[in-house]
Image (cartoon, rainbow, N blue to C red):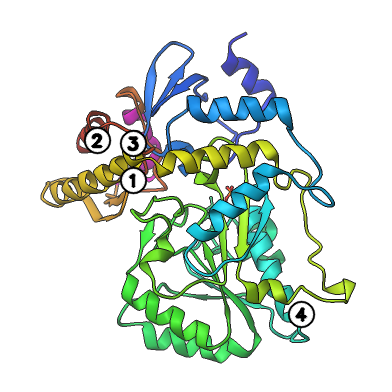
Amino acid sequence: MSLVARDRQVIWHPFTRQKNMLPPIPIVKGEGTLLWDEDGKSYIDAISSWWVNLHGHAHPYIAEKLYRQALQLEQVIFAGFTHKPAIELAERLLPLLPGHFSRVFYSDNGSTATEVALKMAIQYWWNQNEKHRKKILAFHHSYHGDTFGAMSVSDRSVFTLAFHDLLFDVVFIDTPTTTNLSSLIETISAHAAETAAFIYEPLVQGAGGIKMYDVAPMDHLLKQVKKMGIICIADEVMTGFWRTGKSFASHYLSVEPDIICLSKGLTGGTMALGVTACSPKIYDAYMSDDALKTFFHGHSFTANPLACTAALASLDLLHEADCRHQIQMICEENQQFAVQLQHSQLPYKNIRIRGTILAFEIEQGEDVYLNNIGALVTEQALSKGIYLRPLGNTVYIMPPYCISRAELQQVYDCILSIRL
Ligand SMILES: *Cc1c(COP(=O)(O)O)cnc(C)c1O
């Protein structure tokens, strides 16, 4: 039986309607930006396999480090025990983070990283007998993950529809612009006394449609939020590790978050790992003689040594001059391509870039057929050996940093040649 036939009998795929599901493509090998299928056809992974891959697939340096760590220590309970990869990763990460962070709490993925952040912030107030401060503030079009807490602080959408009455109440506001700032601040002020935290994706909202917003109004908003004592949680699960052209998107902003969430690119996209780092202010609220003020949270694979090792290897690679040049190259090429798109006659609108991320919407005509525009784009791109996966009618690229100029040009050419 073929892989596809076997898959069909036993697998349930994420974010995929099961009825009439198109057959998935069996991938047997990855190298650099390329993925190879069973028949030997290759695809440029222009979206970094759901935004996780930084240095290319099956990177030999990361693989070697993993192999050696696997022979040494693959996993150990992280309560009552510790190990070098976890310590070293925290030591190396903390000084890189955008702000004054002093502690790293490990978990398994982006959703758990945001769950941890929310619980950390709410219990911060609870521990100080300010139990009424438990509201969360978030942006419309936000996405913070698929578990219940993460879903609660994400925009209400068709994806969460079945669960709406089970999700906790959140104060949703629009992303800031120069014109809506004062009304946003008014809304926040009205809830400030009961608000524990503000969770936001700095400057680029990922799964909500690769929506981008400006630095200046966000800076202003964050200053006001901080003034009201609200804990700022930067969800940099997608924007972290140079996606936006800086190591973290928060580096564009002058206000430092109190908590930051990392995952996706953290391990270079090799292993699942989540990090929630916090400032001394947050951590100090848990330094108590009262056992009830403990942070009772953990996962079986917290700080998995293999995942931490992959993250350390990825940091080594990010540190290399060649990687920085590549990031710079992608940013510059994106800028030129955005101009080219703007001057094209193609039905593309809201062309936008932030660092290595480029996105735009395809104008939807009257034709019902176009409602499936994403699938159409994916199909055409695949036939040209490129993997794109639009979010609705939003097409975007977020390539691994090792992509060559020629490969990037292939991706651009593919975008220019989409036939609707
Ligand atoms: C993907 C994503 C998450 C969720 O991460 P998972 O590892 O998929 O659970 C959370 N926040 C942001 C900003 C993301 O892009």
- The alpha-carbon separation of the residues under discs 1 and 4 comes to 43 Å
Q: Is residue 174 above or below residue 78?
A: below
CB-based contact (under 8 Å), mark 2 and mark 1: yes
Residue 418: assigned label: 2
In the rendered structure, which segment of residues is drawn in magenta? 367-381
Q: CA distance from mark 2 to mark 3?
A: 7 Å
- Asked whether the beta carbons under mark 2 and mark 3 sit within 8 Å of each other, the answer is yes
Which label's residue is closer to the chain start, 2 or 3? Answer: 3
The answer to which image quadrant residue 410 occupies is top left
Q: Which residue is mark 3?
A: 377
The amino acid marked with disc number 1 is Val
Neighbor class of circle 4 (other Cα within 10 Å; few <14, some 14-19, many 20+) is some
Residue at 47%, 90% (x, y): give it: 186
Q: Amino acid at mark 2?
A: Ile
**Pointer 1 residue:** 395
Circle 3 SS class: helix
In primary-sequence order, the first of circles 3 and 4 is 4
Q: Is residue 389 magenta?
A: no
Under mark 4, the amino acid is: Trp
Percent from the top left, x then y, of residue 281? 64, 77
Q: Nearer the viewer, mark 2 or mark 1?
A: 1
Among the two numbered marks 4 and 2 on one chain, the one whose residue lies closer to the N terminus: 4
Looking at the rendering, in which quadrant would you find the N terminus? top right
**Of tags 3 and 4, which is closer to the observer?**
4
Answer left or right for 226 relative to 298: left
Q: Hey, what amino acid is under mark 3?
A: Val
CA gap, disc 4 to disc 2?
54 Å
